[in-house]
Image (cartoon, rainbow, N blue to C red):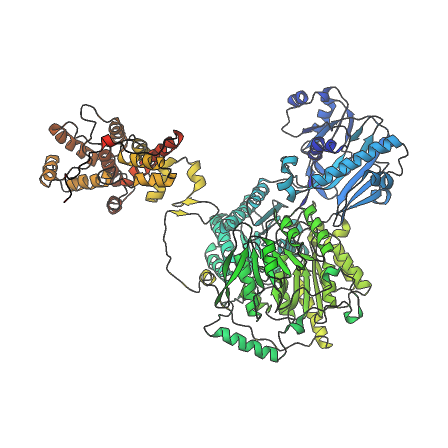
Amino acid sequence: MSAKAITEATGKDILNRHLNQHGAGAANCRFATVNAETDWSKLSIDHPWLLTTPLVVKPDQLIKRRGKLGLVGVKKNFEEVKQWIGERLNKDQKIGNAVGKLRNFIIEPFIAHTEAEEMYVCIYSHRSADTILFYHLGGVDIGDVDAKAVKLDVKVDSTLSLADVKTTLLKAITDAPKKERIAKFIYGLYATFADLYFTYLEINPLVVTADNLYILDLAAKLDSTADFICRPKWGDIDYPPPFGRDAYPEEAYIADLDAKSGASLKLTILNRNGRIWTMVAGGGASVIYSDTICDLGGASELANYGEYSGAPSEQQTYEYAKTILNLMTSSPKHPDGKVLITGGGIANFTNVAATFQGIITALREFQPKLIEHNVSIFVRRAGPNYQEGLRRMRDFGSTLGIPLHVFGPETHMTAICGMALGKRPIPQVASVEFSTANFLLPGGQQAQADLKEANEAAGLGSDESDGLATNNHQQGQSNGANSNFNRKFFSNTTKAIVWGMQQRAVQSMLDFDFICRRDEPSVVAMVYPFTGDHKQKYYWGHKEILIPVYKKMSDAIHKHKEVDVMVNFASLRSAYDSTLEVLEFPQIRTVAIIAEGIPENMTRKLIVEANKKGVAIIGPATVGGVKPGCFKIGNTGGMLDNILHSKLYRPGSVAYVSRSGGMSNELNNIISKATDGVIEGIAIGGDRYPGSTFMDHILRYQSDPETKLLVLLGEVGGTEEYDVCAAIKDGRITKPLVAWCIGTCASMFTSEVQFGHAGSCANSDRETATAKNKALRDAGAYVPDSFDTLGELIHHVYGELVKTGRIVPREEVPPPTVPMDYSWARELGLIRKPASFMTSICDERGQELIYAGMPISEVLNKDVGIGGVISLLWFQRCLPPYVCKFFEMCLMVTADHGPAVSGAHNTIVCARAGKDLVSSVVSGLLTIGDRFGGALDGSARQFSEAYDTNLHPMEFVNKMRKEGKLILGIGHRVKSINNPDVRVKIIKEFVMENFPQCPLLKYALEVEKITTNKKPNLILNVDGVIATAFVDMLRNSGSFTSEEAQEYINVGAINSLFVLGRSIGFIGHYMDQKRLKQGLYRHPWDDISYVIPEQYN
């Protein structure tokens, strides 16, 4: 949702900070907020005026007409206010159909004034303007303000002047100084409204006294999508739920997930104890499922509304599903059991198998509770990789222990609602699709060309037969639409530029072009300002082609004069600027804006600018549109298998327009089954102000002689459907129109529910889906009883058109063969290939990084430390705390040993030569070997072999001497038995005290006794003590088998501690040299012995 209501306190706080910057001249609003947690004594200290001023108190929970409801306390002192709030706090209050608890209150000073000083001001935004309402008599008894107030429209592309305010709004104000003050206030209020992206701002009353202006009651809404622009001015905004519905922590958790994700995740809890729970994919589909459940009598038992869409990851879907299941199984059991409806339309680009895997993981986790609550699950879904998703769900269902019924696109989308509620029988055997698309086999590309020629000879698939009419006098009607739309949008020669590095969407468009037997690809260039000019490789059938990518839009436009469409995948932050830029080029006639969440003010400005330039906009917040046989926008239509099943590779006779992008794909499916197919379909987008309207496209379809039947899928919110009603009545629309507005369930809820799309919220009875469906039916459109029967009604109307000869079904074009990408074929499980890499220690693919099975959050929460991370990443298990401590001690004592050792020396020399950090550290690491630092592995092997073969320490020493080998881990250049190495002492004592057994270390100490008798510096050094202790850990900690322990010794794992530890020191030396600004190092001559031959031979 974009327009979100804020509390009165939040609205007044914003106005306090910004209103008078625009010269409004209003008094600051003094107020204090109270809830159950309020400390009254602290409140009176923070707001001393509470003790000295008569007060007004009222609830601050988005309740309208509080004065009429007796919810305002006037002229009370502080103690009386406390009593007034105490009598109402956390008490149930019924307002209309909604029952809720009063939890938040606002206290303000009482402003003494007369009724004549009360006025009414309201500003609200709509598609083409901001409307300012003013009435010189405000207050609780204002009555029908729409009929009484004076209105002033400020067009989107214009500015407000003081003169406009005075001459239009303030005619009833005769006092000149007073008029001037009020005019400045309204002028400043509007400037604040526009600058801070308000969508609604009502003040009633505005009190105008002789010396000041006071804002008494205020109601406001902000465009929440403008947060990235306005947060510095707004501050942190808390959007409260409507009265009658509590805010649940689970809703806040999903909202937080949604904010951090590129996908869309929504949850509204309607009835915590309800038995019918939904987990629906898609904004439009989620509304339709709620409608159907309510139509079937389940409104009182519907527990939640929500949706997941926009290709959420497996982990995100798991988190969403887990939240729903936790809510469902933490509420009381129901005698009839509970049902979970996991439905959705046909996805355009969401990987169904991946999202289902997340749901399956959550179901497995909650399996015992689901059985305990006697839950039945009904699944219906389709889209990319749906066959694999449904297969996984069926396989899992056979082990779940509760009924789990699974259906695909062969079943009507909402049929599972009737099954779940016992209103329709559950098929015992579902029809299942076991194939996907048609493969293009070698040699098939030439066959494609041959088939195309044959089809064209038969009059099939040519542009002339399926194009839109270019004039607006077809069938004797002038469509009267915006001139931007009195033309052909797409043909089989349409060329487009794609803004954004959307490789999957571009390949999808090219594959669609290919199966439509286009001569050339529709995408000729891409624009991506974050890289230099280059070319991207794509497939055209089996052939590889290169598509240029430009950094600048101007370069792409000037080099591709044939382009007239731009598909804009820019993010919500950059979609406005990139669209404005492309509007400067006259050759662009159509722009599709995919991004959701563009601030409404920006969208309105784009619409105005596009109208000036004669450019049609599809979107924002859309998947796009499709013209079968010609062109499709981005991911519209989904995967190739769905495009084939829905027969989008050739034109039919039915044109549709929808708000929902997800439901447009479902319409493709419904229409392909009920008729001869789609001739064009557009999803105008779910925002409040789409770039093009229902009427824009319906009148285009009306003018097209090849379009015989129109379908409209509207929704709750807005009034555009009434324009369609008027066009039917006045004869501008003569073709049969099947229409349905989703969101009929809204009137059955006791509190306001914002559905998935920003525009799907009724602000008046006229905007409800029920009222619009009735108006369409009364106007002469074909309106079904519910979405459940939409397909049947379309089939009936189509049949009548065939009977009367207005539609003559064509001979079916055989579906073309299509190539499948290797990556997708593998995703579907059709092929297999050995992986190039294998890993078993870390997985970054999900929502959270995982170390050897442990999520990173758990790694941090359990405070396992660096030693614990080493145990996970090096050994794939959680080792005991004493082992982790041992690792950390080893890192500490090996971190550095001064600048003189070879590794540090090399690092220093490189740093002083101006090399970077990585190069300098690597030069030091490359010195590690048997002579420096690398003795740990060798020491471990020597001592282990001697101990394992039962050699007495003296025998071991003698054997090594006879073989002329050094005992690795024994000896030190500086330290001796009389000057022991403290590092060795600390590690030795820790191991002796904490390890369950340390036989090899004890053996090494016996060897030390022998070697130090020969020479005092032949002590057990750091390498030796770490190596032998490491082996003791591997063998005696109980965490490894003997084979695993030996394998780790053989692969060199022990030396890794020295490498990791010494890297810390090398980095320190590098930073030290840079900090000291040391110059290039040159070794002094006097430290070099020059041994040169006496004469040249």
Residue 179 locus on image (x, y percent): 86, 33
Q: Residue at x 42, y 36 (%)?
A: 862
Q: Quadrant of the C terminus?
A: top left
Instruction: Classify residue 141 as left or right of residue 413.
Output: right
Q: Quadrant of residue 1062?
A: top left
Residue 233 locus on image (x, y percent): 65, 35
In the image, 1090 versus 242, the foreground residue is: 1090
Q: Quadrant of residue 478?
A: bottom right
In the image, 605 versus 1097, the foreground residue is: 1097
Asked whether residue 719 appears in the rendered view, the answer is yes
Instruction: Classify residue 365 as left or right of residue 998.
Output: right
Q: Is residue 337 above or below residue 145?
A: below
Number of labels in the image equals 0
Q: Residue at x 73, y 25 (%)?
A: 81
Asked whether residue 344 appears in the rendered view, the answer is no
In the image, 961 versus 312, the foreground residue is: 961
Q: Is residue 796 above or below residue 866?
A: below
In the image, 1038 versus 270, the foreground residue is: 1038
Residue 1073 locus on image (x, y percent): 36, 31
Q: Quadrant of residue 1096?
A: top left
Q: Is residue 16 above or below residue 792?
A: above
Residue 298 locus on image (x, y percent): 65, 53
